[in-house]
Amino acid sequence: MDKIVITGGRKLKGEVEISGAKNAALPIMAAALLADGESIIENVPDLRDIHTMIRLLRSLGAKAVFEKGTVKVKPGNSLQPLAPYKLVSTMRASVCVMGPLLARIGHAEVSLPGGCVIGPRPIDLHLKGLEALGAKNEIQHGYVTSRVAKRLSGAEIYLGGAFGSSVLATANVMMAATMAKGRTVLENAACEPEIVDLARFLQKMGAKIEGIGSPCIEITGVTKLHGARHAIIPDRIETGTYMFAAAMTAGDVLIKKADPSHQNVVIDKLRQAGVRIDKGKSTLRVRGTAKLKPVNVTTLPYPAFPTDLQAQMMALMAAAPGISVITEKIYPDRFMHVSELNRMGANIFLEGPTAIIHGVKKLSGAPVMASDLRASAALVIAGLVAEGTTEVHRVYHLDRGYERLETKFSSLGASIHREKE
Ligand code: EPZ
């Protein structure tokens, strides 16, 4: 296992390029199963989760390869329905092969994703949506088996829960509905840019979808989809992470190949904290300040503040003198990073789903343990400003979601490297 070693105190300066969005690429790779011909997906980041999805597509009988940022998927005509525990348990996004399998072969057997370090992550909405399209779901021996006698049929479906919309449930049901008989209306659909990107890919495959990017998506089913070529959108969570890192180190960083229109809430919060941000067409220049101001944040579905940047925002606020309040509304238990940040001298306490952060003048380097992908990123950026050396252990989490993280931070002047434990 590897660890990342950071010596804090250097201001980040220079340029960094953003990779394609993991959370757009994963459902789009699954969507490629809807055609029998080949799809070519470009700007795919070289990450562990992407390789897990390639393995899953192959185990379902598709041809799938990753080469230099391009994924080619050719499902052919002999797909099989089983998504095994050994793959689903390492990556929950595996569940989004259900919709395409049901649409193509009328049968999916997917291991139920189990517990997760960021809190409970049920799939009841996925099942509710697929059932509304005519699938019969049965849970046995840790697997959900979903079958449809002939063809799925369109329906009006309300896809919400107490927390709001669900990203991957929207993806799953939208994919299934593209080949259902008749019209499907998805109410309370997720509006995340990754869902928009998936819908655009489906349109290129020949799907008929309206209302893309809104909470009401209408799909008119077709009998056949064809392979398509598509380039994945920039990763807005990676973009946000570099924005926070630049802000935190009082640096001056030009972030390239980003989509600034996806970062509005992050830009707003950083400006409130006293950070200067200039937006270009595909660039963001972030100039930090030595005098960060405290800011309050509540995570909610897009276009509000993303849960996937909550930990990184907390690292930033930990070093902004004054009191900030962060409330987590998507995953109320997603706070594993709090005790690790406190080990680095932060002063954060939890009141249910709310973190109260008393910003300190200096964080201090310490050995810390990464618990999930975004918590790991938060510990890395905290390490960039902490006095002395920070060692982030269990970095395999980072490898699931940040392409060439140490190389990118090193090129901005950070003192960071990877070591074998
Ligand atoms: C996606 O997960 C992302 N994953 C997550 O990214 C992200 O944190 C999350 O959306 C929220 O933005 C991918 O895109 C691969 P949800 P997803 O369904 O779709 C509840 C990362 O770090 N819910 O939108 O699984 C759920 O418990 C990750 O990259 C149900 O109750 O999340 C949560 O409270 C981690 N029943 C809320 O909805 C369901 O059937 C939102 O989750 C489904 C979800």
Image (cartoon, rainbow, N blue to C red):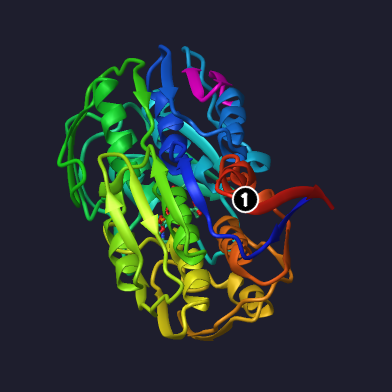
Nearer to the camera, 222 or 141: 222
Estimate the x, y position of residue 124 in percent, counting from the top left.
42, 56
Q: Is residue 233 left or right of residue 53?
A: left
Q: Residues within 10 Å of mark 1 (few under 14, many from 20)?
A: many
- Does the rendering let one see residue 179? no
User: Where residue 202 appears, x then y in whole percent?
Assistant: 29, 28
| Residue stretch rendered in magenta on the structure | 60-73
Residue placed at 48% from the left, 42% from the top?
A: 16
Above or below — where is 364 with respect to 185? below
Our reading of the magenta stretch's main secondary structure is: strand
**Residue at image point 44% right, 63% down:** 247
> In the image, ligand 1 is in what quadrant?
bottom left
Where is residue 45? Give x, y as percent: 52, 34
Q: Is residue 24 above or below residue 121?
A: above
- In this view, the residue in front, 293 or 171, is 293
> Which of the two residues, 62 or 154, is positioned nearer the viewer here?
62
Image quadrant assignment for residue 404:
top right
Q: Residue at x 37, y 27 (%)?
A: 231
- The residue wearing badge 1 is 398
- Magenta span contains residue 62: yes
Quadrant of the image occupied by residue 201: top left
Q: Amino acid at mark 1?
A: Leu
The residue under the point 38% across, 60% down is 306
Q: Quick check: 100 left or right of 4? A: left
Q: Is residue 291 left or right of residue 120?
A: left
Residue 27 rendering spot, x and y as whole percentages: 42, 37
* Residue 188 higher or lower than 23, as above or below: below
Local SS, label 1: helix
Magenta segment includes 64: yes
